[in-house]
Amino acid sequence: MKTSDFYYDLPEELIAQTPIKERDQSRLMVYNRKEDTLEHRHFADVIEYLNPGDALVINETRVIPARLFGVREGTGGAVEFLLLRRIAMDEWEVIVRPGRKLREGARVEFAEGKLRAEILTVEEGGVRRVRFFYEGVFEALLDEIGQMPLPPYIKEALEDKDRYQTVYAKTNGSAAAPTAGLHFTPELMQRLKDKGVRIVPILLHVGLGTFRPVKAENVEDHHMHSEYYELSGEAAQTLNDVRGHGGRIVVVGTTCVRVLETVADDEGRLREAKGYTDIFIKPGYRYRAVDALITNFHLPESTLLMLVSALMGRENALKCYRAAVEARYKFFSFGDAMMIL
C-alpha cells in the first residue's frame, strides 16, 4: 500500500477553526457497512443508533495546557515548548522550537522566571528531555501560564480552554484531545445511560504521533508512535459481559480503538492491562474487539484514516469522505463526526 492511496482533496475552508456553539449539534454522518447506506444526521441523534445493553467506550484522558512560550537565558531568543510525556517528577519529553539551537545544557525561562527549564538530552526525532525548576505545584503553574496545544491547522485562538476537553475528561496527560468525544454533553451522556447503554471509561494519553504526518511512501515503512494506556479489570469485564450477552462495543475515537485492539485476544476477549502501545491498524487488519466506531474526519494520508479504512474498507472510507466534502461537512478536531456501524 502507498501512503498516496489514502489521499483525498479537501478545500481549506472546510477545516473547522472553532468549536460549534452547542457540542451535540455538530453534524453526524452514519455509514452502515452491512447495508452500504449513508445517512446525514446531527450528533444528538447518535442515541438512536445505540441499543440497551450496548457499551459506549470513552477515553477519560485530559489535555494539559502543554504549550509554553519562553525565552532562552543569555540570548533572549523566543522558544516554544510542547510537553509530550512526563518521565519523572520534574522531567519531561518535549518538542522544542527552534530546535537546532537548544542543545544539552541550554536553559529557558517562562513567565519571567516563574518556570525554568534545562535541556538534559537530545533524543531521536528532535525530542528533548528537560528538567523543570519552579516553586509550588507544577500543574497549577501550567494551568496559569500554559496554552492548549491546538493542531497546526487551527489558526484561530481558543477562547475557552474547556472546549478542547471532553465533558468526561478526568486524568491529566494528553498533548491533544481525543476529539471524537468533544461532541458529547452531560445531558446526552445521561440520556444514553437512561436508555441502558453502558458507559465504559478507559485511558489513552494522546502523544507525539498526533502531530507527525506519514512521510514514508509505503505505508508499511511508517513507524508508529507509542502512547500510554490503561484498561481496568472492571472495564475489561464489563466489555466481555456486553459481548457475551449480544451487545455491541461502540468506541468513541481512534484512541479507544488502539487500546482495545492492543489488549484483545483472537476471540476479542479483554483483560486488565496498562503500558505503551504502538499498534498500527491499517487495511488488512482484522478487528477483534470493536463493533462500531464514532470518530471525526481525519487528515488525508494519515494513520487515523488508515485505521478507519481497516474497519470499513478503503474505497468505502474515501467514498464517505468525498460525500462529506460535497455536503460541506467540517473536518478535523473541531469538525463534524462520523459513525461507522
Image (cartoon, rainbow, N blue to C red):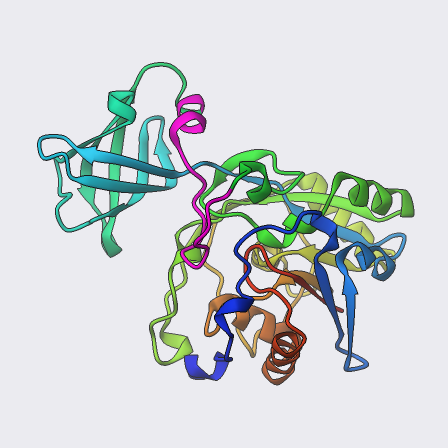
Left or right relative to 170: residue 303: left
Does any portion of residue 146 appear in the rendered image? Answer: yes
- Position of residue 238 measured from the top left corner of the image (x, y, whole percent): 77, 46
Front-most of residues 274 and 40: 40
Main secondary structure type of the part rendered in magenta: loop
Task: Between residue 189 and residue 150, name the one nearer to us.
Answer: 150
Whether residue 320 sits left or right of residue 298 in the image: it is right
Q: Residue 53 location, x and y as percent?
A: 87, 52
Q: Position of residue 247 (x, y in %)?
A: 84, 58
Residue sitting at x 28%, y 42% = 80
Residue name at image x 64 percent, y 40 percent: 232
Spot the residue most to the left: 74
Tell me if residue 282 comes above or below residue 127 in the rendering.
below
Location of residue 314 by image quarter = bottom right
Q: Is residue 132 above or below residue 77?
A: above
* Quadrant position of the N terminus in the picture: bottom left
Quadrant position of residue 326: bottom right
Percent of width and height locating residue 165? 58, 41
User: Is residue 289 shown to the viewer in this render?
Assistant: no
**Boundaries of the magenta span:** 140-158
